[in-house]
Image (cartoon, grey):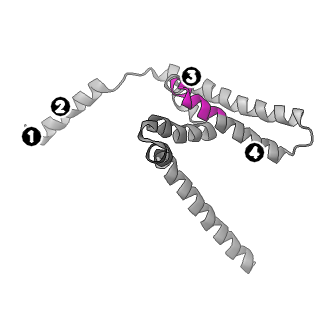
Amino acid sequence: MDIKERNRAYNKYVNAKIPKTRPWPTLFNSFWVGGLICLLGQGINDLLLYLFPNISEQSAWAYTLIILIFLAALLTGIGVYDKLGKFAGGGTIVPITGFSNSITSPSVEFKSEGIVYGICVKMFTIAGPVIVFGVLSSALVGLIYYIVYLFI
């Protein structure tokens, strides 16, 4: 069996194992669930501004993000967010809740390995590179801004 035949056989095997999806219902579910998550965030923000009239808009958004992160982590911990992700696909990867899910999922999965090697280490396997890249790129942009501001 030459390499081309092996590749064809492998591709046939892979195509047989790939779960079949229906693209239009998946796209529709992704759209409305992602929109619902964003609507929830906007509702939390409006509720905070209504209940606490002395709070600034910036503080209200910070509290909204904290609440959304907590809710996504809680729903991941009890297994609801994963079911929602299977139903809605990419709609659950709305930036803040998806990031919370990506940190919480590995720590829930590996909790049997203990607190340090299971929860603490596995928590940053996915999110770690994102955090490192974000910190380094923001430091680089800040340095460039400082240099440009210094000479202008």
Label 4 CA crowd tier, 10 Å (few <14, some 14–19, many 20+): few
Q: Which of 118 and 141 is in front in this view?
A: 118
Q: What element carries label 2?
A: helix
* The magenta stretch spans residue 76: yes
Quote the CA–CA distance across marks 3 and 2: 34 Å
Q: Residue at x 68, y 36 (%)?
A: 68
Q: Name the residue under label 2.
A: 9
In the image, residue 105 above or below residue 124: above
Q: Which of marks 1 and 4 is in front?
A: 4
Q: Give the range drawn in magenta.
A: 71-83
Quote the CA–CA distance across marks 3 and 1: 44 Å
Quote the CA–CA distance across marks 4 and 2: 53 Å
Q: Residue 2 carries which label?
A: 1
Q: Is mark 1 on a helix, strand or loop?
A: loop
Amino acid type at mark 4: Ala
- Viewed as shown, does residue 110 lie left or right of 36? left
Q: Which of 131 and 35 is in front in this view?
A: 131
Q: What element carries label 4?
A: helix
* The magenta stretch spans residue 77: yes
Q: Residues at badges 3 and 2 in contact (C-beta under 8 Å)?
A: no
Q: Which mark is residue 62?
A: 4
Q: Report the quarter where the N terminus lies.
A: top left
Quote the CA–CA distance across marks 4 and 3: 28 Å
Looking at the image, tell me whether mark 4 or mark 2 is earlier in sequence order: 2
Q: Where is residue 67 in the image (x, y as percent from the top left)?
A: 71, 36
Looking at the image, tell me whether mark 3 or mark 1 is earlier in sequence order: 1
Q: Name the residue under label 3.
A: 29
Amino acid type at mark 2: Ala
Q: What element carries label 3?
A: helix
Quote the CA–CA distance across marks 2 and 1: 11 Å
Q: Residue at x 70, y 41 (%)?
A: 66
